[in-house]
Image (cartoon, grey):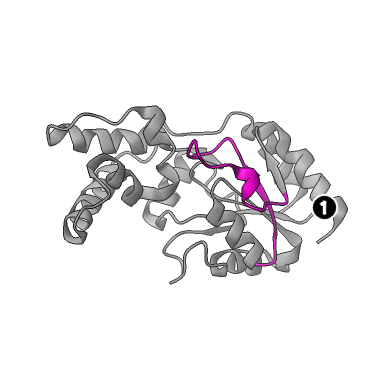
């Protein structure tokens, strides 16, 4: 092992799941006679999960009971096609060939396990990560640091020997709260008005090809 561990957020950082998630939203809108949300707009809401997408399409002021009904339907539809058009972000396949042989790695996501594991299996990532912490593995979810600390324990490393990569401010907040160094993935699902440089990440990278250099720089500076 040449460096510490690297932990990844899933949606918008490691895997481009937007095509399948936005398709579910627009299917639900179409079934109710509503116009679809343009993909470019909906894509940037994917990091906020099913609830964020539903509020985008159906309105931010939905009553809680109606929101929950729509959320349950959204998840039911998505479960039937978690990896139809989803793919690992371009450039990360080559990087994983390096990481697999150079450092432990894992995934910490707010996505439920029932959707995380089939997605990873379909993409050929199942069983490769040293730790996979889903949104329902623990009672806490990001931005709480508990899932990241759990992953570090599973990898047998102190949090300070881990680097967390994510595409949302909650990822950076969770990483710092866990005592980890952080990388903001600016290729992810980021609203136009949001600036990853404002999140306080140790490094901001715009393309997956920059990841190995960023990891090496953080390793050279120590925990």
Occupied quadrant, residue 158: bottom right
Q: Main secondary structure of the magenta part?
A: loop
Residue 155 percent coordinates (x, y): 67, 63
Looking at the rendering, in which quadrant would you find the C terminus?
A: bottom right
Q: Residue at x 58, y 68 (%)?
A: 150
**Of 156 and 64, the residue lying toward us:** 64
- Residue 191, relative to residue 66: is it above or below? above
Q: Position of residue 109 (x, y in %)?
A: 50, 55
Residue range (magenta): 178-202
For label 1, count other residues whose C-alpha is less than 10 Å away and answer few (under 14), some (14-19) or many (20+).
some
Whether residue 185 appears in magenta in the rendering, the answer is yes
Q: Is residue 15 above or below residue 136?
A: above
In the rendered structure, the answer to whether residue 174 lies left or right of residue 64 reads: right
Q: Is residue 192 visible?
A: yes
- SS assignment at label 1: helix
Q: Residue at x 60, y 52 (%)?
A: 129
At x 22%, y 54%, the residue is: 67
Residue 73: x percent and y percent?
Answer: 21, 49
Left of 67 or right of it: where is 112?
right
Residue that sits furthest to the right in the current view:
220
Specify the farthest residue to the front: 193
Circle 1 is placed at which residue position?
219
């Amino acid at each position: 092992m040449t460096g510490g561990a690297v932990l990844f957020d899933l949606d918008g950082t490691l895997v481009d799941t937007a095509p399948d998630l936005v398709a579910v939203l627009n299917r639900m809108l179409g079934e109710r006679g509503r116009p679809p949300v343009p993909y470019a707009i909906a894509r940037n809401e994917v990091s906020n999960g099913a609830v964020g997408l539903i509020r985008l399409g159906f309105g931010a002021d939905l009553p809680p009971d109606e929101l929950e009904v729509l959320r349950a339907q959204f998840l039911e539809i998505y479960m039937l096609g978690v990896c139809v058009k989803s793919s690992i972000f371009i450039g990360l396949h080559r990087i994983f060939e390096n990481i697999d042989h150079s450092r432990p790695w894992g995934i910490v996501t707010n996505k439920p396990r029932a959707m995380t594991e089939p997605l990873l299996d379909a993409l050929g990532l199942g069983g490769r990560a040293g730790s996979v912490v889903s949104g329902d593995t623990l009672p806490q979810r990001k931005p709480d640091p508990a899932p990241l600390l759990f992953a570090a324990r599973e990898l047998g490393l102190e949090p300070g020997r881990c680097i967390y990569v994510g595409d949302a401010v909650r990822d950076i907040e969770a990483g710092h709260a866990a005592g980890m160094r952080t990388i903001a993935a600016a290729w992810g699902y980021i609203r136009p008005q949001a600036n990853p440089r404002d999140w306080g990440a140790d490094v901001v990278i715009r393309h997956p090809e920059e990841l190995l250099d960023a990891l090496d720089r953080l390793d050279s500076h120590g925990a």
